[in-house]
Amino acid sequence: MLSTFKVLTKNIHRLSIKENFMNLQMKNLICFVFLLGLFSCQNPSHKQLILIQNGSPISVFYNQGQWEENEGALKGQGVRNFLFSTHSLKGKNFELSAKLKLSNQKGSAASFFIGENHFGFEGAKETLYLNGPLFGGLKLLGSPEDYFKRGEWFEFSVKTENQSLNFFLNGKKAYSVSFKDSLQGDLGFSPWRSTMYIKECTIKGDFISFDPPKNETYSIPTLDLASDQHRQIVVDREKGQYLGHPTTVLLEDNKTILCVYPKGHGRGGIVYKKSTDGGLTWSNRIPTPDNWKTSKEVPTIHRVVDKEGKKRLIMWSGLYPARLAVSENDGETWSPLKKVGDWGGIVVMGFVEKLKKPGHYLAMFHDDGRFFTAKPDRKSPVEFKLFKTFSTDGGLTWSYPEVVQKDTKVHLCEPGCIRSPDGKQLAVLLRENSRRKNSYLILSNDEGKTWSEPKELPASLTGDRHTGKYLKDGRLFISFRDTTHVSPTKGDWVAWVGTYEDIVKGREGQYRVRLMDNHVRGDCAYPGVEVLPDQTIVTTTYGHWTKGESPYIMSVRLKLSELDAMFKAKKGLIEKK
């Protein structure tokens, strides 16, 4: 028998029952979680867990400022602002009973979720909806007003019976779906575009305890460059058009920067631009081969050199099948996109890393079962796989991908590679897409043939799409989207400054920098990072830089010497609330 009490702070301190609760120093208190009753590991299905009672959080966790007790209910709002149960579902037996209401409900995509599977209270089409592998993808149901009135309290319940999962609204069955073997995944609610109020919520069933992140926040300072307009250069902007997800490459003249990005969120026709003065000015959009318009995913551009010393540029376009375009003349002309093999994936490629043997390269990407083969094979619970592939001819052909890591609980993806200063080790930083944990790190000491087990990184390096470069003094500048669980810059475009040793030893680093303020949280910062001979960093990405407008492409220019001066003078620091 196991009885456990948990208190969640920004660092999620885990306490045993032997600790003296009266002496606990409560730093940056977020919420506290109190597990009631005794859980039997052998037979948990007969136990009940109270998540919310009279609007007070009992066995849930969330980030400060995103959920709050309000007039007898727990109130939350915002995209990607999830409320999690402290226990995850794993088994055949499950019941949930909740009382809630939604304001701004119309088209809000507010939902209850089990893992990647969502029961939506009202989607963009103003219907109840289902989404996720358990349901076979997106399904639209009837009007929510057939079950409850917008803005009023309603009863929501879920119950398993005879290998089926049943959903009820105010006692009326809304949907039933069969499942095989067992159900698995984190449990919780997502307000998305609504404001959600939950008065009561109780669950019963087969559970395992939720393993919280290594740490939820960081102690190093954050410098703020978001208001420094003299650093900011518009690369491309089009009214009403989503422009996103750029990558860049700096040519050997140390002045020419090439940039590619899609007209759309992660997919759409590829736009191509060039700067010949180190990113100070940018060309008009350059004509591209016709089939670049058919790109299904984020394009990524890379310099490659074969064993004879022939330089080329390659550009990947992902999903199935992965395709490749090649330039033999430094981007003056390009081939159409051509199929590489009978495989595909997401963010192909996260990186393309030159190996020690001339003409040899390593690249990585990920997939969740939807795009690796022509026929999707997404599992429930969703399993993320991290793949590696090699080229021995300077990036023209690539080996059949091999799995580096796979998991259903921790979803590692969007790899970014940094070689150690002595050249002997490769470090890959990884996005954690389930948002249960911090970002992760894997290491290779044999040029990518084998890899260490994934290790959770500090909160200071938690983010999406890490892209890093060395400066002359040996420090690293790594740019990414901030997805730290508790951070004053969460959802913004940020960078981390520190050393390679900081990364591999799990240290926080020297400081962080907010590069720009993103006005739609979590939708920005697939960055390119280039370093000019005078040590000017030119980092380029997309984001919602102007309220109410579509995202567009910006570059920010800076030097570490400028940041060091700010850091020393304690100027431009972002206050941690």
Image (cartoon, rainbow, N blue to C red):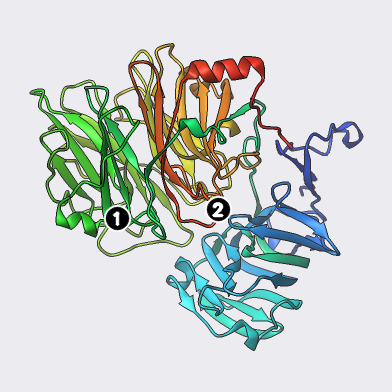
Q: Which residue is most to the left? A: 308
Residue denoted by label 1: 319
Q: Residue 409's spot in the image, x, y percent?
A: 52, 50
| 281, 298: nearer the viewer | 281
- In the image, taking residue 142 as reference, residue 159 lies left or right, namely right
Where in the figure is residue 230, as x and y percent of width and height?
Answer: 48, 31
Residue under label 2, please give it.
Answer: 547
Element type at marker 2?
Answer: loop
Q: Residues within 10 Å of mark 1 (few under 14, many from 20)?
A: many
Q: Earlier in the sequence, mark 2 or mark 1?
A: 1
Answer yes or no: do the residues labelled 2 and 1 have beta carbons within 8 Å?
Answer: no
At 72% across and 76% down in the image, what residue appears? 151
Q: Amino acid at mark 2?
A: Lys
Between 142 and 400, the one lying in front of the other is 142
Horizontal side of 70 relative to 453 (left or right) equals: right
Residue 328, label in figure: none
User: What residue sits 61% from the left and 39% below the top?
Assistant: 489
